[in-house]
Amino acid sequence: MEEKHGAIWVNVEVGGSAKIVFENYISSVQKLHVIYQQANGCFLPYSFVAKNDPQWRLPLWSQENEKAMMPTIESAKEYLDNYAS
């Protein structure tokens, strides 16, 4: 766990071999977009929103979308455009 952009970040792909290859914080709507790349070359785009949790002083980044696999980083970024507002 760590603090990112005013909320607590819990790494989604902890157990896998995926690594973060793209991260974008959209301050106007308080969303965090992250793209992981798996060892097999596929890209996993995630959109997170900050949600309050009574157990923590800071909000938690909560996953907004279902898991999706994309063949290119460009297609993953296009997918996340749907969650940019």
Image (cartoon, rainbow, N blue to C red):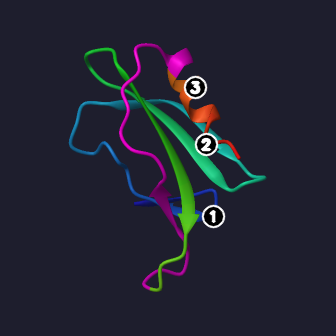
Q: Which tag, 1 or 2, sits closer to the chain's start?
A: 1
Between the residue at mark 1 and the residue at mark 2, the CA separation in whole angstroms equals: 19 Å
Q: Which tag, 3 or 1, sits closer to the chain's start?
A: 1
At mark 1, the secondary structure is loop
Image coords of residue 18 (percent x, y): 31, 30
Q: Is residue 3 above or below residue 55?
A: above
Residue at mark 1: 6
Query: Can you say which quadrant of the picture contains the N terminus?
Result: bottom left
- In the picture, the disc for residue 83 is 2
Residue type pointed to by label 3: Lys
Q: State which mark lies toward you, 3 or 1.
A: 3
Say if the magenta span includes residue 3.
no
State the residue lying farthest toward the right.
28
Q: Is residue 75 above or below residue 27?
A: above
Between the residue at mark 2 and the residue at mark 3, the CA separation in whole angstroms equals: 10 Å
Q: Are marks 3 and 1 in contact (CB under 8 Å)?
A: no
Q: Which tag, 2 or 3, sits closer to the chain's start?
A: 3
Residue range corresponding to the magenta coloring: 55-75
The chief SS type of the magenta part is loop
Residue at mark 3: 77
Q: Is residue 29 above or below residue 24?
A: below
Q: Quadrant of residue 84?
A: top right
Image coords of residue 9 (percent x, y): 46, 57
Residue beneath the point at 49% across and 52% down: 64
Q: State which mark lies toward you, 1 or 2.
A: 2
Residue type pointed to by label 1: Gly
